[in-house]
Image (cartoon, rainbow, N blue to C red):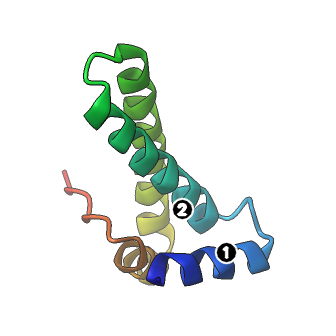
Amino acid sequence: MVKNSFISVFSQEENRGSVEFQVFRFTNKIRRLTSHLELHRKDYLSQRGLRKILGKRQRLLSYLSKKNRIRYKELISRLNIRESKTR
């Protein structure tokens, strides 16, 4: 139920270029691909696509954490994403 309210918040915003919205879309794709790969373990093309999307999301999250740490923490808590490791 929390997920649905979060979707409605983003669809009302209409700011599809924002980092938060892009991370949200990538997270949905990642969850969908992960459930697909649980059924089809040898679908290597989907595995590659999943790795590419994970990398894109990671780059966006690192950008957001550098620019605005508060928005980053808020987004991570809303989407239930683990915080990235700092190097």
Q: Tag 1, which secondary structure?
A: helix
Mark 2 neighbour density, 10 Å: few (under 14) some (14–19) many (20 or more): many
Q: Is residue 50 above or below residue 63?
A: above
The disc at residue 61 is: none
| Camera-nearest residue between 18 and 62 | 18
Q: Residue at x 47, y 38 (%)?
A: 53
Looking at the picture, which amino acid does disc 1 mark? Phe
Q: Is residue 1 above or below residue 87?
A: below
Q: Sequence-wise, which precedes: disc 1 or disc 2?
A: 1
Q: Residue furthest front?
A: 39
Q: Residue at x 55, y 77 (%)?
A: 4
With 74 as the anchor, is 81 left or right in this view? Answer: left
Q: Is residue 2 above or below residue 42?
A: below
With 42 as the anchor, is 65 left or right in this view? Answer: right
Q: Residue at x 35, y 18 (%)?
A: 43
Looking at the picture, which amino acid does disc 2 mark? Phe
| Camera-nearest residue between 8 and 35 | 35
With 28 as the anchor, is 50 left or right in this view? Answer: left
Coordinates of residue 50 in the picture (x, y in percent): 40, 33
Coordinates of residue 73 in the picture (x, y in percent): 37, 79
How many numbered marks appear?
A: 2
Q: Are marks 1 and 2 in contact (CB under 8 Å)?
A: yes
Coordinates of residue 85 in the picture (x, y in percent): 19, 56
Query: Dividing the picture into quarters, in which one does residue 72 lie?
Result: bottom left
Provide the residue designation for mark 2.
24
Coordinates of residue 39 in the picture (x, y in percent): 30, 32
Query: Dividing the picture into quarters, in which one does residue 22 lie?
Result: bottom right
Q: Residue furthest right?
A: 14
Q: Residue at x 43, y 65 (%)?
A: 66
Mark 1 neighbour density, 10 Å: few (under 14) some (14–19) many (20 or more): some
Provide the residue designation for mark 1.
10
Q: Tag 2, which secondary structure?
A: helix
